[in-house]
Image: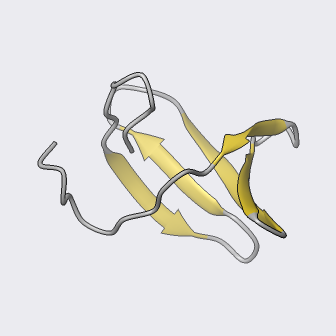
Amino acid sequence: MTLPDGPTFKGTLSLNQDSYHVAWDGGPAGDWQIIYAPGTYAYVRPDGSAGGAVTKIVPGNPEGF
């Protein structure tokens, strides 16, 4: 995952019934959701609070990070 301000995180991703689990290499782990509302996708943090908008989802590493 690459954040808008530049940091790139790598880790292990696994799917749950209604969320996904990510364990970042050298960082935290948690279960997240992506919720769709008309015109936008939003992250929901493990504690249920809003985590930000999804601006782009691209499989692989097309930007060469």
| Image side of residue 33 versus residue 61, left or right | right
- Which color scheme did the rendering employ for the protein? secondary structure
Compared with 39, 29 (above or below) is above
Left or right: where 30 falls relative to 26? right
Q: Position of residue 20 (x, y in %)?
A: 61, 62
- Left or right, residue 21 beside residue 63: right
Query: From what the image shows, is residue 16 above or below residue 43?
Result: below
Task: Please state which of residues 13 and 1 is positioned toward the viewer in this rendering.
Answer: 1
Q: Position of residue 5 (x, y in %)?
A: 42, 22
**Residue 51 image offset from top left, x and y in percent:** 73, 37
The picture quadrant where one finds residue 29 is top right
Quadrant housing residue 37 = bottom right
* Residue at left offset 30%, top offset 42%: 10
Residue 32 lies left or right of residue 36; in this view the side is left
Residue 23 x %, y % = 46, 44
Vertical comparison of 18 with 49: above or below: below
Residue at 34 percent across and 46 percent down: it is 11
Q: In the displayed orientation, state which residue is furthest to the bottom.
A: 17
Residue occupying the point 75% across, 41% down: 45
> Closest to the observer: 37 or 51?
37
Q: Residue at x 49, y 66 (%)?
A: 14
